[in-house]
Image (spheres, rainbow, N blue to C red):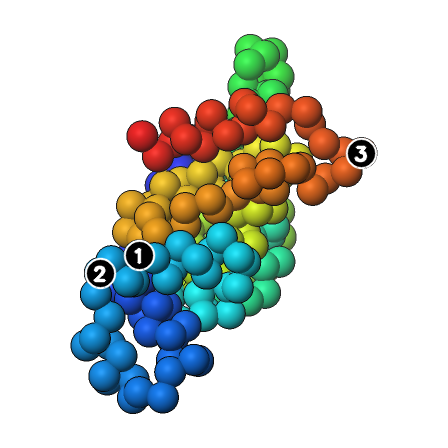
C-alpha cells in the first residue's frame, strides 16, 4: 500500500542570505549587490533570527522550496491544495491510466484485522471494476469516478518560507488530520535540514508559547514540543 515519501527537489540558493539581504535593504541606502557582498554569515544569522522571532515574515517570501511528495491519498491532497499561496502539479487520474492502484489505509482501520480485511476487499472490487470499465472502452477520465479518496497520488508542491510557516502552524498541530500531519512532519524535517535559521521555531503556537486553539487546545504542549524536537535530532 502507499508509503509516504517527501524530498526537496529544489530551493532558493542560500535562502537565509536572500531573506537577510531583502530585510536589510528596507533600511539601507546601499545597493542590493553591495549589501549581498557586505553581509557576513554572522550578520545573516542574527538578522534572520530577529526577523523570525518578531514575526516579520514578509521577507521570507523571497525563499522558495519545491517538494516532491509520493504516497499520500487523494483525501490528503485535497486538504493540501487548500493552501492557496503555493503551486501544485499532481499526477492526473484523467491522463494516467492506473494499471496497479495503491491506496492509503488509515491506522484506525489497519489496527483491526476485520476492518482491514473488509477495506482491502472493497478496494479490490473497485480496482477490478475500474479495469473492466477501461477495457470496455470507458475513458480513464470517466472510469476514475469510481476510485476512492484512499487512492494514492503523487504531487510536486512549491511554497515560499512564509507560507511554509503558516502551513506548519496549522498542519503540525495535533488537531490536524493524521495523514497531512505526517506529511507536514516530513516537509518540516526536509525544510529545516536546508535552512535551520528560517524554520527554527516553526510549528503550532504551542512551540513558541501559548496554544492558539483556545477551547480546542489538546493540552499536550510539552508532548508536541518534544515530538518536533525529536523529529529534527
Residue drawn at point x = 65 percent, y = 37 percent = 210
**For numbered disc 3, what is the local secondary structure?**
helix
- Outermost residue, right side: 215
Q: Contact (CB < 8 A) between labels 2 and 1? A: yes
Residue annotated with mark 3: 215
Q: Position of residue 97 (x, y in %)?
A: 43, 55
Q: Is residue 83 visible?
A: yes
Q: Which one is earlier in the sequence, the residue at label 3 or at label 2?
A: 2
Q: Is residue 53 above or below residue 115?
A: below
Task: Look at the numbered disc 2 and give the secondary structure of its residue.
Answer: helix
Residue 94 appears left or right of 24: right
**Residue depth check, mark 3 versus mark 2: number of the one nearer the observer:** 2
| Dot 1 alpha-carbon crowd within 10 angstroms: few under 14, some 14 to 19, many 20 or more | some
Marker disc for residue 41: 2
Asked if marks 3 and 1 touch (Cβ < 8 Å), the reply is: no
- Residue 20 placed where, x, y %? 35, 68
Q: CA distance from mark 3 to mark 1?
A: 37 Å
Placement of the N terminus among the 4 image quadrants: top left
> Residue 178's spot in the image, x, y percent?
57, 33
Residue under label 1: 45
Q: State whether residue 51 is above or below residue 104.
A: below
| Residue 147 in view in this figure | no
Q: Does 68 sit above or below residue 5? A: below
In the image shown, does 231 or 10 lie closer to the viewer?
Answer: 231
Q: Nearer the viewer, residue 2 or 18?
A: 18
Of tags 3 and 1, the one toward the viewer is: 1
Q: How far, Cα to Cα, is label 3 from label 2? A: 43 Å
Snapshot quadrant of residue 143: bottom right
Q: Residue at x 60, y 28 (%)?
A: 221
Name the image quarter holding the C terminus: top left
Residue 115 left/right relative to 18: right
Amino acid at each position: 500500500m502507499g508509503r509516504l515519501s517527501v524530498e526537496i527537489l529544489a530551493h532558493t540558493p542560500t535562502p537565509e542570505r536572500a531573506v537577510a539581504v531583502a530585510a536589510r535593504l528596507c533600511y539601507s541606502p546601499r545597493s542590493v549587490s553591495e549589501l549581498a557582498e557586505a553581509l557576513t554569515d554572522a550578520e545573516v544569522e542574527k538578522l534572520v533570527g530577529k526577523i523570525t522571532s518578531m514575526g516579520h515574515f514578509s521577507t521570507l517570501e523571497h525563499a522558495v522550496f519545491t517538494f516532491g511528495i509520493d504516497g499520500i491519498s487523494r483525501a490528503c491532497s485535497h486538504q493540501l491544495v487548500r493552501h492557496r499561496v503555493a503551486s501544485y502539479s499532481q499526477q492526473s487520474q484523467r491522463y494516467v491510466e492506473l494499471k496497479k492502484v495503491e491506496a492509503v489505509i488509515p491506522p484506525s482501520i489497519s489496527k483491526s484485522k476485520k476492518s482491514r480485511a473488509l477495506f482491502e476487499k472493497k478496494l479490490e472490487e473497485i480496482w477490478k471494476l475500474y479495469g473492466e470499465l477501461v477495457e470496455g472502452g470507458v475513458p480513464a477520465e470517466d472510469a476514475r469516478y469510481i476510485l476512492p479518496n484512499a487512492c494514492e497520488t503523487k504531487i510536486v508542491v512549491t511554497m515560499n518560507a512564509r507560507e511554509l510557516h503558516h502551513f506548519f502552524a496549522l498542519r503540525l498541530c495535533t488537531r490536524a488530520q493524521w495523514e497531512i500531519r505526517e506529511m507536514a512532519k516530513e516537509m518540516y524535517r526536509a525544510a529545516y535540514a536546508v535552512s535551520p535559521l528560517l524554520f527554527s521555531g516553526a510549528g503550532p503556537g504551542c512551540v513558541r508559547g501559548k496554544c492558539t486553539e483556545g477551547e480546542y487546545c489538546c493540552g499536550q504542549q510539552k508532548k508536541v514540543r518534544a515530538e518536533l524536537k525529536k523529529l529534527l535530532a
